[in-house]
Amino acid sequence: MSPNASPVSLTRYLIEEQREGRIGPNLRLLIEVVARACKSISIAVGKGALGGVLGDAGTAGEASINVQGEAQKKLDVLSNEILLEANAWGGHLAALASEEMDHCVVIPDEYPRGSYLLLFDPLDGSSNIDVNISVGTIFSVLRCPDDIATVGDEHFLQPGTAQVAAGYCTYGPSTMLVLTIGNGTHSFTLDREIGSFVMTTRGMRIPEETREFAVNMSNQRFWEPPMQAYVGDLLAGTQGPRGKDFNMRWVASMVADVHRILTRGGIFSYPLDAKCADKGGKLRLMYEANPMAFLVEQAGGEASTGRQRMLDVAPTGLHQRVPVFLGSKREVQAAVGYHTRHDMGSAA
Ligand SMILES: O=P(O)(O)OC[C@H]1O[C@](O)(COP(=O)(O)O)[C@@H](O)[C@@H]1O
Ligand SMILES: [Mg+2]
Ligand SMILES: [Mg+2]
């Protein structure tokens, strides 16, 4: 446990925040339900091959494909079902949207309509499931407009600044929930013996400077010129204009890469490249980039598309993709600088 952490459970933390008037009882309940679902996913992930949950979803040799055109893993489908079932009874939610579903699921009329919208990436880093590397769940909470007759996908299309809560759960050597309700970013570690999340860092802070970057280098030749120039200068180290050597890490689970950056600094980027340019990027705005941007800003970092603050992007689709740069403030500003200078026509 970090020296500044108080030994409080997630439940107690949320009750304190409610007492302070920062959240209402419905948002508290919603976060508790998501956390409970994450515990179930953690158990399924932890069983691995013994639970029969590894490998691709689908039957009779036919791959199951999601709305993104990506093959689903069994755990993608199972995690999605766990989150849907946990939230289905209503009360706190009006509708849910997921990476794994084409459109939102609206809480049926027979249940009271809640005041929130929940978005999630039920299992992030799917390519790592079968090789026992950390994966995670990412979630974002928005308010549901109250002057509407029926809820639809369009009501989710709110900028990241409208998020009232965001978080992720990482299923690694330990299971950790990292949460913000707009009052700092805090981490909770699952105590498996007692079955509850216990706060292990209150107020995570990302160092402003870094010597570590995270990017999939195999895409280098597909990047735009400003990204080529930026990473070229990182690789030049002490011999180049940055004047320092950089280290590189790439887990290929956004949750794990962002968790490292929240813990010890760094910059994470999934830039625009020629392979994904027609889609706008690789990572999804509503349930990957925006919740991570909220967490990172609340920890003193920055998050950008390279050309715009991430949280200011006006969404146009539930599954919209964006380029992503996030992490240590000065390093994100440096990466954005290359894009700005390039777009202004000067040498990056
Ligand atoms: O395999 P690549 O191209 O390096 O992409 C890795 C990225 O894709 C993702 O796995 C996408 O998430 P999903 O697994 O939820 O589709 C990110 O977690 C990760 O940062
Ligand atoms: Mg993902
Ligand atoms: Mg996913």
Image: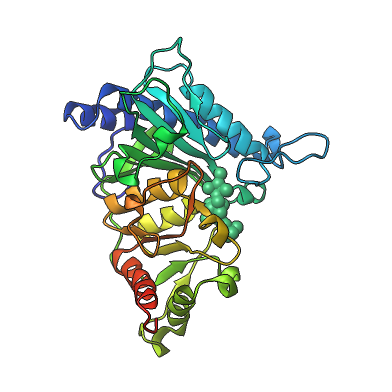
Q: For residue 329, which quarter of the picture?
A: bottom left
- Quarter of the image for residue 99 reads top right
Front residue of 293/16: it is 293
Q: Quadrant of residue 264?
A: bottom left
In the image, taking residue 70 as reference, residue 295 lies left or right, namely: left
Q: Residue furthest right?
A: 60
**Picture layout, residue 89 above or below residue 241:** above
Indicate whether 164 appears above or below 115.
below
Q: Is residue 194 visible?
A: no
Number of numbered tags placed on the structure image: 0
What's the image's color scheme? rainbow
Find the residue positioned furthest to the bottom.
239
Assign the C terminus to one quadrant of the image. bottom left
* In this picture, residue 244 sits left or right of residue 97: left
From where the camera sits, is residue 240 visible?
yes
Q: Is residue 156 left or right of residue 319?
A: left
Question: In the image as oriented, which residue stretches furthest toward the left?
Answer: 20
Name the residue at 26% across, 48% down.
Answer: 203
Residue 54 image point, x, y percent = 69, 40
Residue 239: x and y in percent read: 41, 90
Q: Percent x, y for residue 244? A: 37, 82
Q: Where does the image place residue 81, in percent across and percent down from the top left?
A: 58, 28
Front residue of 175/249: it is: 249
Report the residue at 78% width, 34% height from top.
59
